[in-house]
Image (cartoon, grey):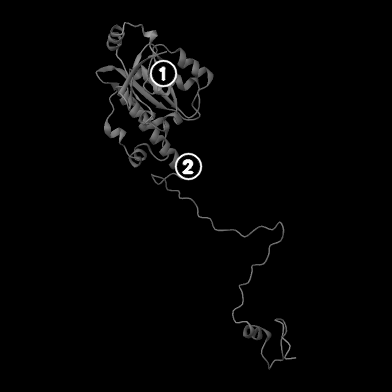
């Protein structure tokens, strides 16, 4: 019947080979051993997880500040493009400012209170605008009045407030009732991209008072007979349209080449 096989735990006499040597001889390539099973409820062994880099663009902030810096960088660039499209004097190097230069100028993380834009209208130095970037905690009546005081010091009659969240009720009332100082409110999410650069958005041009008068005389029409565009329209808000103005809209047409229409702002 042959020799009986020895188990791994059985040892022969001191003069003979051990059971381990016998097992290796019988199976020189054993399968890999499985790790011992953990008990129910026992903590699993810890796995190595690489820590996120703490060096942001400027090397000081973490991943959260790096994302916030990029967000503010994009919002600021859109605001500058919006002011230029409204006819204000904006330097090209300010719009082309890189992210690294932006963080180097305003710090890491970027403080919103330090991003203040002041521009003058081309051909009208008395028409000035201030842009304020407000912190999340500053959306009440006091901050609106503080911005108005800063506008007074800079002789600016137009102001733009860029917020992270909506204004409080009293603050919205203050903005709506302000007569001498015209205030506009934008959420940061509305300015992450320039909507006028989208291929589906046609070209919008505001007519001057003289151009509006010539248009109505040419077609012997009243302004209220024109198609309308609301002040809440995103493109109307981008261009800072005011009630009673007329805007020229130029669309590309496959048949006519260009199709021009006019709309009355209500």
Furthest residue in direction right, as rendered: 1
**Which mark sits nearer the N-terminus, 2 or 1?**
2
Quick one: SS at disc 2?
Answer: helix
**In the image shown, does 233 or 64 lie closer to the viewer?**
233
Which corner quadrant holds the N terminus? bottom right
Furthest residue in direction left, as rendered: 123
Q: CA distance from mark 2 to mark 1?
A: 31 Å
Q: Position of residue 179 (x, y in %)?
A: 41, 11
Residue placed at 27% from the left, 30% from the top? 91
Query: In this figure, which residue is indicated by the disc labeled 2?
Result: 64
Which corner quadrant holds the C terminus? top left
Query: In this figure, which residue is indicated by the disc labeled 1?
Result: 183
Q: Is residue 112 above or below residue 88?
A: below
Counting the numbered discs, the total is 2
Q: Position of residue 100 (x, y in %)?
A: 34, 42
Q: Is residue 102 above or below residue 22?
A: above
**In the image shown, does 143 or 186 lie closer to the viewer?**
186
Q: Position of residue 227 (x, y in %)?
A: 40, 14
Quick one: SS at disc 1?
Answer: strand
Q: Is residue 87 above or below residue 101?
A: above
Asked if residue 216 lies left or right of residue 54, the reply is: left
Q: Position of residue 57 (x, y in %)?
A: 39, 44
**In the image shown, does 208 or 124 lie closer to the viewer?**
208
Furthest residue in direction front, as rendered: 255
Please tell me in which quadrant of the rendered image residue 101 appears. Answer: top left
């Amino acid at each position: 019947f042959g020799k009986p096989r020895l188990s791994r735990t059985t040892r022969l006499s001191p003069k003979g080979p051990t059971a381990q040597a016998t097992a290796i001889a019988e199976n020189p390539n054993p399968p890999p051993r499985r790790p011992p099973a953990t008990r129910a409820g026992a903590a699993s062994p810890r796995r190595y997880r690489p820590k996120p880099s703490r060096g942001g663009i400027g090397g000081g902030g973490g991943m959260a500040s790096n994302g916030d810096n990029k967000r503010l960088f994009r919002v600021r660039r859109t605001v500058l493009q919006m002011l230029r499209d409204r006819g204000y004097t904006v330097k090209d190097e300010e719009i082309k400012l890189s992210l690294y230069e932006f963080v180097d100028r305003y710090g890491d993380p970027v403080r919103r209170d330090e991003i203040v834009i002041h521009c003058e209208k081309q051909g009208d130095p008395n028409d000035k605008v201030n842009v304020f970037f407000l912190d999340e905690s500053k959306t009440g009546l006091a901050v609106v009045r503080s911005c108005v005081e800063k506008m007074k010091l800079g002789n600016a009659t137009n102001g733009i407030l860029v917020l992270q969240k909506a204004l409080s009720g009293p603050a919205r009332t203050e903005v709506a009732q302000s007569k001498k100082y015209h205030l506009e409110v934008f959420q940061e999410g509305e300015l992450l991209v320039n909507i006028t650069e989208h291929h589906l958005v046609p070209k919008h041009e505001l007519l001057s008072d003289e151009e509006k008068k010539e248009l109505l005389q040419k077609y012997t029409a009243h302004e209220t007979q024109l198609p309308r565009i609301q002040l809440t329209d995103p493109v109307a808000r981008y261009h800072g349209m005011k009630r009673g103005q007329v805007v020229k809209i130029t669309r590309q047409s496959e048949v006519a080449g260009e199709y021009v229409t006019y709309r009355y702002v209500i």
